[in-house]
Image: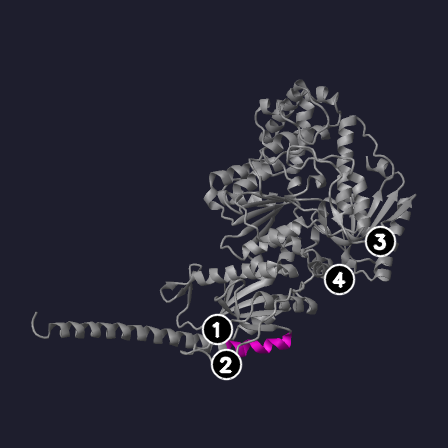
Amino acid sequence: MPAGGSALRQSRRLKEQAAGLFELSQLKLQQARNFEAAWSSEEELAAILRPLDTLGWTVFEDRLWPNSKHANVDFILVGPGGVVIVDAKAWGELEIRDGSLYRGDACEDDQVEKLSALMDSLAEGVKHTGLTSAAISAAMVFTERTLNATLRPVTLLGDRDVVPWVAGLRQRLNEEQVARVVEAVDACCPEMPTAEPAKRLFGSTTRPAPRVREVADEALIDVDALADALLTSALAGPIEDWMTFLHPEQNRLVRTQWNGPARVRGPAGTGKTVVGLHRAVYLAQRSQDPVLFVSFVKTLPIVLSALARRLSEAACEQIEFVGVHKLAFSCLELTGDKCRLDPRQAASAFRAAWRDTDAKTHLGRIDERPSYWQEELDHVIKGRGITEFEVYRDLLRVGRKTPMRAEDRGYMWDLYVAYEDQLAARGIHDFNDLLIKARAAVAAFPDLFRYSTVIVDEVQDLNLVALQFLKELSGDGPNQLLIIGDGQQSVYPGGFTLAEAGISVTGRATVLKNNYRNTVEILEEARRLVSADSFEDLEGEPQAGTRESDATRHGYLPVKVDAESQGDLDVALTSMLQRTRQALDVPWGDMAVLVERRKDVEHYQRILAKAGVPFVELTAYDGVTSDRVKIGTIKRSKGLEFKFVFLPGLSREPEPIWPGETSESHAERCERLRREQYVAMTRARDGLWLGYLAGASERAV
């Protein structure tokens, strides 16, 4: 080895170490500058946020994530608008491109995902307060910028835009609720621990700390008492506020992750629709694709859209509330298909087919009413999409009581074929054609329809082809399809099973049993109507009419009035409406008059107008609070709720058999009528008025 070789190697090694230490030093200095910039931006933002306390907001600073020892969140705000998670950012470069967040050339979508995960963690941590996921927002706030944009579920704001945005959030919590949530957030997200002092080399000179005695903590929160308080608060507001009330026990359903189609069912008043509504908002906040919320009742989507806006204005823009037939039209328009829907001509086509076939003679011996056989065609055959006689011949006719032999079904099939020929000759379609064509269009062009999830409300009122159409729209995958409904509230003929629709909810079905809407007195009155009638609930097995459903609130006994004439009944109705407003201080807008037929709606509109009672028809009701009595048919009221419900025109006499009606079809019709009245009674939250008219059943024939 040449002289000095080892020294040279040592010199080179030390220089390499020095270079490495220099690079490490520069890296640490850069990290220190980054943290100093973050500290500076957080300090500046804290100065901006702290004055929110004058508006009733509590500002938590530098808090731990729920169940974390190190991860922190810059700010958590709790106030009238709910809970807001705020993440301060001091980025020199910022761009929103193709639905993603960029810092220079680096995609920062993981920052959005992190805040979304924090929203879920916080919702889980404070769920005992009754705070819903829709009441938790998240914002990334960028210093020295003006900005207001959304990357769901996170809002992007400039530091000068954040206070107006927070102050503009819709009020969700009252003063007492804010206090409870503040306590829960404080416990769930404690302060970040301060840095430990450096350890002395030769030990500490301080005196030892006294032993901390462990004391069993008493429960800080009485969950039942909190739930009662939340319920009481919801009951006090307008009925539209109540219709967004979600009981803490139902919170988990809103955030549940299902690996396939799921179902929520249960008796009236158990909160099925509001669970679906909150879930739609929750998923809309977390997806780039829209959420589809479908119902058979075409007026219900309008109301639900307004209610969703109460929960989240931004999320509502990502939810499509629509009736199933309007949706089918939209799908056909998108695929370029045509459907010439003409209900009047379709009815004429059926009359011609009935007149020109042997079905009139043969089936007329079973039930001479053409209407019964039109129901068979619409709901049992075509509503199931049946195109082969052998399938119909062997079919279990769910929901139908009149027996039919193979020969009878043969004549029914002839009637069906003749009806289709009549439609073709006229160049028109019926409502079932619309759904069948839409189902085929979606199957042929699946890539045209992109929804993050499909939520189907009042599923018991759909027919089979309608549900198959919606299943095609939802596609396959986790959380893609949620079915909500209750077979005991079905008011249309026929039925089907989920298996026939190709849907399995095994392991993903939830039965709600707690009735939060009705008082004990209202529920008992309604139950009497249907307790002896079994019903189909899409499962393939009849369900008993008596069901587990627990109401805990007590209230007024239902008021029952017997009138000998229509005039007497009209006076009794308007008198009770006025007394309810004056004596109980109930706004007009929290009352509803529900009737069976369209012509009854028109009659009572005239009566209310004459008495000076303001009203709005359910077909025009948009879910916005107004001081007008709602009036409409019972079918239009499905999915809605009212504080006080008035049902005029009921009959105490048994429903008479119509001319030509069999005892079986009479029994079937009476069951549907009882279910319809059950639906009407259970729309009432606080009070129920029943107006009986002598001879009403005879006049209804």
Which class describes the residues within 10 Å of circle 4: few (<14), some (14-19), or many (20+)? few
Q: Label 2 sits on what residue type?
A: Thr
Mark nearer the N terminus (4 vs 1): 1
Q: Which dot, 2 or 1, sits closer to the camera?
A: 2
The residue closer to the viewer here, 465 or 155, is 155
**Label 4 to label 3: alpha-carbon separation:** 16 Å
Residue of label 3:
556
Q: Which dot, 2 or 3, sits closer to the camera?
A: 2
Mark nearer the N terminus (2 vs 4): 2
Question: Splitting the image into 4 quarters, where does residue 598 fall?
Answer: top right
Residue of label 4:
236
Q: Is residue 512 magenta?
A: no
Asked if residue 374 shows in the view, the reply is yes
**Dominant secondary-structure state across the stretch colored magenta:** helix
Quarter of the image for the C terminus: give it.
Answer: top right
Q: Which numbered dot is residue 113?
A: none
Residue of label 2:
206
**Residue placed at 82% from the left, 57% from the top?**
613
The spot of residue 526 in percent (x, y) is 79, 44
Contact between marks 2 and 4 (CB within 8 A): the answer is: no
Residue of label 1:
146
The spot of residue 679 in percent (x, y) is 75, 44
Quarter of the image for the N terminus: give it.
Answer: bottom left
Contact between marks 4 and 3 (CB within 8 A): the answer is: no
Residue found farthest to the right: 564
Contact between marks 2 and 1 (CB within 8 A): the answer is: no
Residue found farthest to the left: 2
The region drawn magenta spans 44-55
